[in-house]
Image (spheres, rainbow, N blue to C red):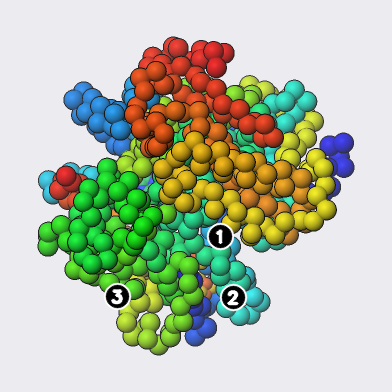
Amino acid sequence: MIELVSASRCIQCNLCVNVCPTNVFDAVPDAPPTIARQSDCQTCFMCELYCPVDALYVAPDTELQTSVNEAELAEAGLLGSYRKNIGWGKKQTSSAKTDQTFQVLKQMK
Amino acid sequence: MLKTLVNNFALNLQADVLVIGGGPAGTWAAWSAMSGGARVVLVDKGYCGTSGCAAASGNGVWYVPPEAEARENAMASRESLGGFLANRSWMKRVLDQTFTNVNLLADWGYPFPTDDQGKPYRRSLQGPEYMRLMRRQIQRAGVKILDHSPALELLVDEEGKVAGATGINRQTSEKWRVISGATIIATGGCAFLSKALGCNILTGDGYLMAAEAGAEMSGMEFSNAYGISPAFSSVTKTLFYNWATFTYEDGTPIPGAGSQRGRSVIAETLLQQPVYAILDQASEEMRSSMRLAQPNFFLPFDRARIDPFTQRFRITLRLEGTVRGTGGIRIIDETCAASVPGLYAAGDAATRELICGGFTGGGSHNAAWAISSGYWAGNSAAEYALNLGQQANQLRVRGVGEAALQPKAENASSPNINEFIQAVQTEVFPYNRNYFRTEKGLSDSLSRLDNLWQIIRDTQIEDSQLIRAREAAAMVATARWMYNSALERKETRGMHKHQDYPQQDANQQHYLISGGLDQVWVKTQPFSNTNKSLLTTGAAA
Ligand SMILES: Cc1cc2nc3c(=O)[nH]c(=O)nc-3n(C[C@H](O)[C@H](O)[C@H](O)COP(=O)(O)OP(=O)(O)OC[C@H]3O[C@@H](n4cnc5c(N)ncnc54)[C@H](O)[C@@H]3O)c2cc1C
Ligand code: SF4
Ligand code: SF4
């Protein structure tokens, strides 16, 4: 579930409010969005992918809340790691380009 | 009457074609209707581009070059798995259309990879990339998109033809209405809020809306798809479990357990004790290919600090219902029309029996079906609407939504919607009710589901709860078509496993059509493998 909107990183673009399919966030005037309906989060990671400044963190656990520490997440390279894997963002190449499904399917039993 | 209604809607639009749902099926439908010269409005419950299961996951596509042998193999390979209910002429059409449209994606700039021989490889679509492109493409074409705007009910005109929908913007709470010449339901399947990847937006709303307008379902017994995921996570991607060893807690392998054909063994074991998996069958070389093929498969593992290749992790089976089942709105001909005039269905919202019979599970048929049925529905809806001409703009319309919208009686106390939803989940989640079905289990569940239906149907819901309540109503309705159809199919075929009738019965190689709200009914429709008879079975059913 979504666990973090980093106040220090967020540029208040409200993209996450727009793109979250289950409407988890609320926009707040002159402030980062709030996680308003956390239990509706379906752990799809889409908000993280669209956040331009890696200010969001979706913990892998779908049912339980996890307490997170922003500094540790940043240290471990987990802020924006999905965005990096998918190759979205400035000067990145979409990893769709390097999709190796063909290799995997070749080995299918 | 029209005048007074208008005032109640903050947004009141007219279109030739209204598309409900903005996943692959909906966006292809919108694009093709637009190409056919129609004015198109597309509404999505979430955000068109991220919502639905394709956006969050990624899709293998049934993309087969038009070479006779390859096509033959593609069609033959899944026929027995689907219990011989797939229709060859539909398969051929879908293979043709998918090939054309996926090539179009390349023209539009989808970054397809090249294979080890340097040839473009087009059998796999990364979800976020694909759906971001589709959104951009339909916006360019001029489709008007309303995000966060779930449809709540369909509108019909005086003759009962479907003529648009109304809904609500869940971020502004403003109500909208779109009056249209034709309407396409592309709302995806129903996974009962199980938190399977990308599926919580999929609650069967389209089935309910269609049924209220008089449409029928088909294949609802093929609705018990469960996806393997780590117990803690939402990621129900099963392909890589081909390289898994499934074990008990003590590390001994579970005999017969497997990702595709051995999934029953996993379900049976899970009823007794925890099940673990480890992807230890993947070679070193494969491991890096896997990461490059499906980055989001590894995301939860990396974050939970588990190396799935060397460390065992607990798994579960999450219900994906009709998302990876095959049942849905019955379509009556090659235009993807539903059995009510003016209404079309596409993607998971429509039955996929025509191309995969009683089984899809993982596999690339779903994506291909969404692309082609969306394309056809858009095309034919545009033609239908444009033929209505001026008439369409003067329609006198009324909403046909009942459950939670227009209660027949009024219950004194409103149910707690969350508890209500849990009550529905209790009937459809358990493996020993839905995965493994028995006459007794199904009947017991149905008596409780019928009761739940009465409650939600007769409850006056306050506006703030309306969207959830309609989802709840759609889930109960879906469960009732599922289980009534499952009771009727007294055999084991496709993904439908009936413990009392463990064999496939040659006399039941037919479709099961279902429908009804207060009174659910099920009837058989003969299976046919030729185009012509398919077109005429509408009357025979
Ligand atoms: C984890 C996972 C992996 C998968 N992998 C594959 C694969 O490899 N190959 C394959 O072929 N298939 C795969 N599938 C299935 C495939 O993703 C679907 O069949 C396909 O996405 C269906 O497209 P769709 O447009 O019909 O539905 P969806 O993509 O689910 O889109 C439905 C849309 O309707 C909207 N909606 C719902 N209710 C309403 C409402 N009331 N009003 C307005 N809008 C509404 C939703 O917000 C959503 O945008 C997978 C599914 C899952 C869950
Ligand atoms: S997308 Fe990122 S930067 Fe934009 S509002 Fe959300 S958290 Fe802030
Ligand atoms: S993970 Fe998905 S559901 Fe959860 S907040 Fe982000 S976008 Fe919304």
Q: Determine the residue positioned at 74% across, 40% down.
A: B402
Q: Quadrant of the N terminus of chain B?
A: top right
Q: Is residue B450 above or below residue B467?
A: above
Does the residue at mark 3 contact the one at mark 2 (Cβ under 8 Å)?
Answer: no
Q: Disc 1 marks which residue?
A: A22
Mark 3 vs mark 2, foreground winner is 3
> Residue B426 at what x, y percent from top left?
54, 53
Local SS, label 3: loop
Which amino acid, by three-letter code, is at mark 2? Thr
Q: Determine the residue positioned at 66% across, 61% down.
A: B171
Number of marks in the image?
Answer: 3
Give the label on residue A34, or none. 2
Whether disc 1's CB lies below 8 Å from ligand 3 is answered yes
In-front residue for pair A48/B537: B537
Q: Is residue B233 above or below residue B347?
A: below
Which amino acid, by three-letter code, is at mark 3? Arg
**Badge 1: few (under 14), some or many (20 or more) residues near its Cα, within 10 Å?**
many
> Residue B336 at what x, y percent from top left?
51, 27
**Chain hosting mark 1:** A
The residues tagged by marks 3 and 2 sit, at their Cα atoms, a distance apart of: 27 Å
In-front residue for pair B251/B152: B251
Mark 1 vs mark 3, foreground winner is 3
Q: Quadrant of residue B231?
A: bottom left
Q: In the visual, does B20 lie left or right of B243?
A: right
**Chain hosting mark 2:** A
Give the label on residue B305, or none. 3
